[in-house]
Image: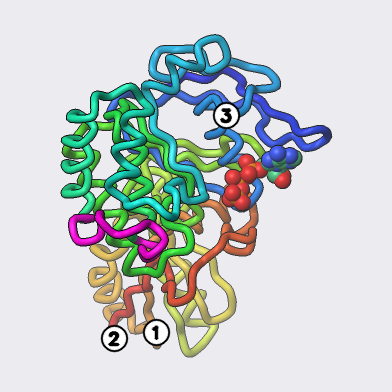
Amino acid sequence: MIETHELTRHFKDVQAVRGINLTVAPGELVALLGPNGAGKSTTLRMLTTLIPPTSGTAKVAGHDVVRAQREVRYRIGYIGQGNGAAHSQRGRDELISQGRAYGMKVTEARRRAAELIESLDLGAVADRTVSTLSGGQRRRLDIAMGLIHAPELLFLDEPSTGLDPQNRANLQQHIVELRERYGTTIVLTTHYLDEADAMAERVIVIDHGRIIADDTPARLKDEHVGDRIILGFAHESDAAAVASRVPHKFHRSGTELTISVPGAPRLVTGLLDDLRAWGLPPAEVEVRRATLDDVFLQLTGRSLREGGAARSAGDTEDTEPALVEV
Ligand SMILES: Nc1ncnc2c1ncn2[C@@H]1O[C@H](COP(=O)(O)OP(=O)(O)OP(=O)(O)O)[C@@H](O)[C@H]1O
């Protein structure tokens, strides 16, 4: 559905995208993840024909983004970061006009609008003017606008930025359901690690205009970070004694011993039994599952959050550490 070769875009002296090679198969739900300024939107804007590449090539839905812009545009939907719908129109009319702009007959546009209003849970608000809708409703209407012509491929640029956690969760559920219902290939950009983790079967991490990782969230976490069991001891000598006995990779810092082991939540009870049997029970135990932020930190030496990622008020940590009583 998407195939790029060394896709590159410069803005004067800014190298926004530096040679991206990307393949997306039909039906995939892919998240492009990266800090502010990483090049995510620029990549999307080239794939959607809004700006031409400086060099390299991209084929989207079977057509070249430079030589066959029109063919690409008919086959894709694009929801940018701003709101697309006009303020003074009713949502339903906006959808129908959008369908007509894509050459649909009015009856077909009406039928499709009604179907999307139902799918995106907009029934109660579709006949209100767009300016009266809440942020979450506006975002769902934007998505309906992008889907009106039943595109094979939908691009969503930061679909949930600015929404509160509840509306974000609601929107994510709608996107996943739409994908199941219509089989649309979806490529979205996000700053939200939990969003990428929860929705995407494939996460592509972009940093400084380059792809630095591309895999399933689970494999990225296993491969680059893994689970950890963190043990706190009363005495450094106890931590050292345990370190000399455990058969896993570890890092010791004073009284704290961090053991890296896949499947940590399953193994922790067995490990605690061993520690008690050795007469070296820990004072504290924490099982920490890898997050995509840990992956990013491992790959770049920076936290994605420190990198300026926007998080809305009320966001919680991506993964709460599991605390174990001893
Ligand atoms: N029209 C433009 N003119 C000049 N520089 C630009 C332009 N568009 C983007 N850039 C620069 O290109 C780089 C990549 O920007 P881009 O918007 O693609 O990043 P992003 O990963 O989408 O960031 P964000 O998460 O903040 O949306 C940034 O340094 C940005 O300032």
| Residue receiving disc 1 | 284
Where disc 2 sits, the SS reads: loop
Q: CA distance from mark 1 to mark 3?
A: 54 Å
Residue 246 is at least partly visible in this image:
no
Residue type at tag 1: Glu
Q: Which is more toward the observer, 60 or 241? A: 60
- Considering the whole magenta stretch, tell me its main secondary structure: loop
Please tell me in which quarter of the rendered image ligand 1 is found: top right
Q: How is the image coloured?
A: rainbow
Label located before the other in sequence (2 or 1): 1
Q: CA distance from mark 3 to mark 2?
A: 58 Å
Image quadrant in which the C terminus is located: bottom left
Residue type at tag 3: Leu
- Beta carbon at label 3 within 8 Å of ligand 1: no
In the picture, the disc for residue 5 is: none
Residue depth check, mark 3 versus mark 2: number of the one nearer the observer: 3
Residue 127 sits inside the magenta stretch: yes
In the picture, the disc for residue 50 is: 3
Residue 11 sits inside the magenta stretch: no
In the picture, the disc for residue 326 is: 2
Image quadrant in which the N terminus is located: top left
The residue sitting at 25% across, 46% down in the picture is: 176
- Beta carbon at label 2 within 8 Å of ligand 1: no
Instruction: Give, as a single range, the part of the protein colored magenta.
Output: 122-136
Q: Position of residue 250 (x, y in %)?
A: 48, 62
Q: Which is more toward the observer, 180 or 219? A: 180
The residue sitting at 27% across, 47% down in the picture is: 92
